[in-house]
Amino acid sequence: MAYSGRRGRIYGRGTADNKGQHSVNLASLELVLRARAGRLRFNVKFLMEMGEEVGSPGMAAVTELHREELCADLFLASDGPRVDAVTPTLFLG
């Protein structure tokens, strides 16, 4: 997976609170690609919404407008609380 940014790091506003979750998802996808000779054998759609702290303005309208394109068998949301800064935390539901 090619990363943009400086010295292989990704920089951006709001990355501090979500970079771990997104990094795990992308790294896992990369491992699946390696294990399957570059073929996922399933479809992947990413919707990265960055306005959650201001109430996600426009999110309902965008998802309604693109309802068909966003249709999926699985929805994985990567956000949530941490037990503390050093303990890996995984919540499933």
Image (cartoon, helix red, strand yellow):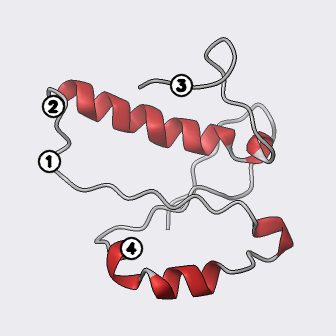
| Residue 27 badge | none
Q: Earlier in the sequence, mark 1 or mark 3?
A: 3
Find numbered disc 1 in the image and state the secondary structure of the residue it sits on. loop
Residue that badge 1 annotates:
41
On the image, the x and y values in percent for residue 93 come to 49, 68
Residue that badge 2 annotates:
36
Spatial separation of the CA atoms under disc 4 and disc 1: 18 Å
On the image, the x and y values in percent for residue 47 come to 51, 61
- Asked whether 84 or 14 is in front, the reply is 14
Q: Earlier in the sequence, mark 4 or mark 1?
A: 1
Which of the two discs, 4 and 1, sits closer to the camera?
Answer: 4
Q: Earlier in the sequence, mark 4 or mark 3?
A: 3
On the image, the x and y values in percent for residue 27 come to 45, 32
Spatial separation of the CA atoms under disc 3 and disc 2: 21 Å
Which of the two discs, 1 and 3, sits closer to the camera?
Answer: 3
Spatial separation of the CA atoms under disc 1 and disc 2: 8 Å
> From the viewer's perspective, is 88 left or right of 32?
right
Q: Are marks 1 and 3 in contact (CB under 8 Å)?
A: no
Spatial separation of the CA atoms under disc 4 and disc 2: 25 Å
The residue that appears at 46% across and 61% down in the rendered structure is 76
